[in-house]
């Protein structure tokens, strides 16, 4: 029983740290402020809420469809672990540069979105919050949940992370004033370092799963 609790707790922490660092709410808070500066405070709160909800639904859908996509294209979990690890490492390396990007979309897309009523859906919900990295992570983590209770742990993790993201985004002005851009860069560097460590572990796990049977067979 204790071993089961420890295993689920470890997986819960892995889900939290992976998703939180990939979504990087500290880094996207200034982007949201820039994109919603013409809106009222209440509108910005509503946009943050709707965007977080859309991101939550997106990650849940992709986590459910993960196994279907793997089977359809004949992709092994090990291959996806290695690819995901490389993608996460690259994202972490960029975060170490601590450059608070102004947007993840083109200027044209941003202008068109700001003139419409669905800015909370795109680009805020997708791809600002639920970007390629977070979507890949939800699929990869889902592949490590053979039991229903493990998948429930993943869902709770996604819900908790997106709740934290929402609170950070709605308090963007306060956080920006308190930390300043220098403080936000420091936090972003730390999250980048954590993400790179997680990425290396994903790659190691994927490689070991492939190599161990080969080594065992050759030693017989």
Image (cartoon, helix red, strand yellow):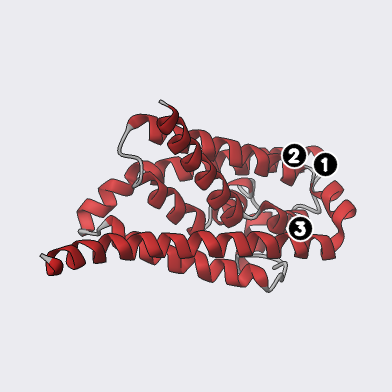
Residue 72, quarter of picture: bottom left
Write the residue at 73% across / 54% down: 29
Horizontal relation, residue 38 to residue 217: left or right: right
Q: Is residue 76 above or below residue 66?
A: below
Q: Closer to the observer: label 3 or label 1?
A: 3
Q: Are marks 3 and 1 in contact (CB under 8 Å)?
A: no
In this rendered view, identify the residue nearer to me: 104 or 110: 104
SS for tag 3? helix
Q: Residues within 10 Å of mark 2 (few under 14, many from 20)?
A: some
Q: Are marks 2 and 1 in contact (CB under 8 Å)?
A: yes
Return the x and y of residue 121 as percentages of the image width and height: 57, 47
Residue that label 1 marks: 41
SS for tag 2? helix
Q: Closer to the observer: label 2 or label 3?
A: 3
Horizontal relation, residue 99 to residue 54: left or right: right
Query: Which residue is the extreme one toward the right?
Result: 177
Structural distance between the alpha carbons of marks 2 and 3: 14 Å
Write the residue at 67% across / 62% down: 111
| Total count of labels | 3
Q: Residues within 10 Å of mark 3 (few under 14, many from 20)?
A: many
Residue that label 2 marks: 45
Structural distance between the alpha carbons of marks 3 and 1: 15 Å
SS for tag 1? helix
Residue that label 3 marks: 30
Q: Earlier in the sequence, mark 2 or mark 3?
A: 3
Q: Quadrant of the N terminus?
A: top left
Q: Residues within 10 Å of mark 1 (few under 14, many from 20)?
A: few
Return the x and y of residue 97 as percentages of the image width and height: 68, 74
Write the residue at 25% across / 66% down: 211
Structural distance between the alpha carbons of marks 2 and 1: 6 Å
């Amino acid at each position: 029983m204790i071993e089961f609790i420890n295993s689920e707790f470890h997986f819960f922490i892995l889900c939290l740290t992976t998703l939180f660092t990939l979504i990087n709410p500290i880094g996207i808070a200034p982007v949201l402020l820039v994109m919603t500066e013409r809106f009222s405070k209440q509108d910005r709160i509503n946009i943050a809420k709707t965007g977080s909800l859309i991101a939550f639904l997106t990650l849940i859908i992709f986590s459910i469809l993960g196994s279907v996509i793997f089977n359809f294209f004949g992709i092994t979990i090990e291959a996806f672990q290695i690819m995901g690890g490389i993608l996460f490492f690259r994202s972490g390396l960029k975060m170490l540069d601590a450059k608070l990007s102004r947007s993840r979309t083109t200027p044209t897309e941003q202008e068109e979105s700001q003139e419409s009523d669905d800015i909370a859906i795109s680009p805020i919900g997708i791809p600002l919050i639920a970007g390629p990295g977070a979507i890949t992570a939800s699929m990869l983590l889902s592949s490590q949940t053979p039991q229903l209770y493990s998948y429930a742990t993943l869902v709770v993790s996604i819900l908790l992370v997106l709740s934290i993201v929402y609170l950070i985004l709605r308090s963007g002005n306060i956080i920006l004033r308190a930390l300043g851009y220098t403080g936000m860069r420091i936090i972003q560097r730390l999250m980048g370092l954590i993400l790179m460590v997680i990425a290396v572990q994903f790659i190691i796990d994927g490689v070991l799963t492939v190599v161990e049977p080969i080594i065992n067979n050759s030693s017989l």
